[in-house]
Amino acid sequence: MWHSPLWLIFLVCTILLCIQTTKTERSRRQTNQLSFQDPSRTFCVPSPATAGTYLDQLRMTYSSYAIHFSIPSHDPNFVVDPDKGNLVIAQNLPSGQSYAFTVQAQDLNTGSAATAYITVNTSPCGPVNTVLTTPATPQMTYPAFEFTATNCDSGSIVGQLTVTTSTGSAVTYALGGSPYFTINPAGQILVSNTPPLSGTTQTLHVMATSDGQTSAVPVTIIIPANCYGSQSSPDIIG
């Protein structure tokens, strides 16, 4: 039996099938290798370079709902929407400065990752850079928010953010800068993990996206020593 022509044909076909499957899998992995459409970006922002200025959306070579964006250095001057890749200035920047940092994207399904190298110059800057002239939309109701949390239990509401859009389109929110807070679809900031210390201050940024545009606003949360009891009382920095 083991020396019959049929068995040899079966063995050869099995080997060829394994080889083809391996090539197909290798090709699939190469095709799905995550990369930025433009892995090196330079921007020039005319003065004043204010918090909330929208730079651009960092786009990938293929789209997936499982792609997560982050700034590994946690540069406080910039923030990126973790789901959409929209890059925004997080705080006011002085003129004549240059900032260099990286943005990392990772496909949570395949584990594939990519890095984009970002340079942001504040005017004056060279002619090769992109000058931003379009104001960011949607617009935050206030340029900055400050809330005092009087209840640090998980799930407690810390404050409410509001934005306006020229088209009335739906707004989605994202929050970065602190592992202790999150934001829900209504724009409410909530305690997600009880802060380890009271009598401290947390600084974070909230991004609002509508019609493909993103704005960001700095948010300060004061955690008093007696962070227990009723709902927090918000204060607005005008």
Image (tube, helix red, strand yellow):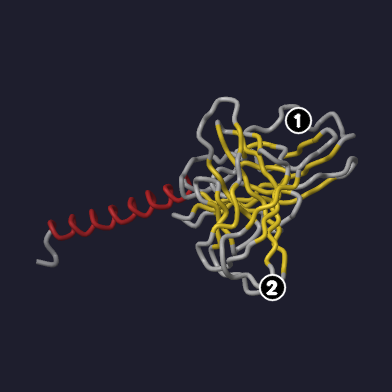
What's under tag 2, amino acid-wise?
Answer: Ala
In the depicted structure, whether residue 201 falls above or below residue 59: below
Earlier along the polypeptide chain: callout 2 or callout 1? 1
Circle 2: element type: loop
- Callouts 2 and 1 close, C-beta under 8 Å: no
Who is closer to the viewer here, 87 or 179?
Answer: 179
Residue beneath disc 2:
225
Q: Residue furthest left?
A: 1
Amino acid type for the residue under numbered disc 1: Leu
- Expressed as whole percent of the image width and height from the top left, the position of residue 22 reads 37, 55
Query: 99 left or right of 4?
Result: right
Q: CA distance from mark 2 to mark 1?
A: 43 Å
Q: Residue, x 61% and y 59% (percent of image)?
A: 232
Farthest front residue?
Answer: 230
Callout 1 crowding tier (Cα within 10 Å): few <14, some 14–19, many ≥20: some
Q: Position of residue 16 (x, y in %)?
A: 29, 53
Which quadrant holds the C terminus? top right
Which residue appears at 18% of the width and 55% of the height? 9
- Mark number for residue 132? 1
